[in-house]
Image (cartoon, helix red, strand yellow):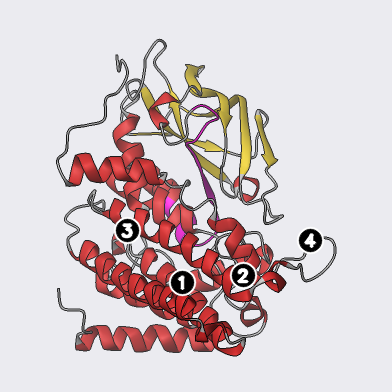
Amino acid sequence: MDLRDTPEDQAFRAEVRQWLSDHVVGEFAEVGGRGGSGDETYAFDARLAWEKELAAGGWTCIGWPVEHGGRGASIAQQVIFNEEYVRARAPGRVGVLGEGLLGPTLIQYGTPEQKARFLPPIVAGEELWCQGYSEPDAGSDLANLSTRAELVDGAWSVTGQKVWTSLAHQADWCFVVARTEAGSRRHRGLSYLLVPMDQPGVEVRPITQLTATSEFNEVFFDGARTDAANVVGQPGEGWAVALATLAFERGVALLGHQLSFRRELDSLIADARSNGKAGDPVVRQRLARAYAELEILRWNTLRSLSNIDGPVAPPEASIAKLFWASWHRSMTDLALDVRGMGGQVLGGFPYELDDVQRTFLFSRSETIYGGSNEIQRNIIGERVLGLPPEPKGDAR
């Protein structure tokens, strides 16, 4: 694994840096890197306009094959783009679920007609997607889901409830895992459906979080319809497609995420120096540990990316999810300790959070969403270390 830029990569980095310098101006500069985790509803209209600005410059979906509207960028170039994007404090993306999850899934499993219909609007920043996976009784145990769909007059009729659906209130479409074979259990009899959100039979209820924002939503389907052709893969065999989508979450965007972490840690170290907490040997040791662990996270993620062979990330990618979620939660605990009691005072009435407070509160969810820490440990134990699987119930 050679982490140095090749001459071609150096030229690509310079191109990315220059474009961002020229375009992160005006209202886009005012967004100032906002719109990340726990802040995803901030300045949505400006960030949607930014998505189209990126598209006009050819900077959406850069890792997709050229024939599907991307640049065919290498893993190294995708890492470079994400690094420079964070350094430029560009606005938080609003099209990440379409670009990072649904698009790669369609490229791998979709029909030519599905690719022609759904990929171009993602590249253009014109259609936004949400993910219809979790349910009240099927979170980390996704195979327990009960949302059902049946073919009625040439269309799928979908009925059920999804929860923790990020940005459903702003999405045009949802990729939904539903049970399409009556009487089936666990991972059998599931299908992966593409369902339009703007129709009768779809109700979205935002969930107000500790951050006072509502990235997450409940979504109720009551006979919502989608064309019979909008099933990815074969009906009843959607489990493999759903797992592939989950694996795409462990991609190169994590490197950009880690640069955001570095910015947070640098700010924390500056706070500790300014208020004298850096002189406390215990605090100093915790800061050093946070710095070292973030470096380990970066190198491990790069190593994992260098081993990708095929369309999805390997199970070792669960190591990165487990590591970064635990690290970030611990780091935000340290941030409040460094600030002291004054750091718990709100900035304004009635509930005005600053960046540190908002990040601390949202980080409580990071060891749960995208696969809880417990699930990641199971994956690592069974699929990486080859340990005996955890006993499971009847999977008929």
Q: Which residue is mark 3?
A: 320
User: How far is the residue under mark 3 from the one under mark 1?
Assistant: 14 Å
Expressed as whole percent of the image width and height from the top left, the position of residue 195 reads 52, 36
Task: For label 3, count other residues whose C-alpha is less than 10 Å away and answer few (under 14), some (14-19) or many (20+).
Answer: some
Q: Quadrant of the C terminus?
A: top left
Q: Which residue is mark 4?
A: 351
Q: Nearer the viewer, residue 256 or 68?
A: 256
Task: For label 4, count other residues whose C-alpha is less than 10 Å away and answer few (under 14), some (14-19) or many (20+).
Answer: few
User: How far is the residue under mark 2 from the one under mark 3?
Assistant: 23 Å
Disc with the residue nearer the chain's start (1 vs 4) = 1
Residue at 52% x, 88% y is 22
Residue at 34% x, 23% y is 236
Disc with the residue nearer the chain's start (4 vs 2) = 4
Stretch of the chain drawn in magenta: 119-137
Disc with the residue nearer the chain's start (2 vs 1) = 1
Task: Inspect the image, locate mark 2, and give the three-letter code of the amino acid beneath it.
Answer: Val
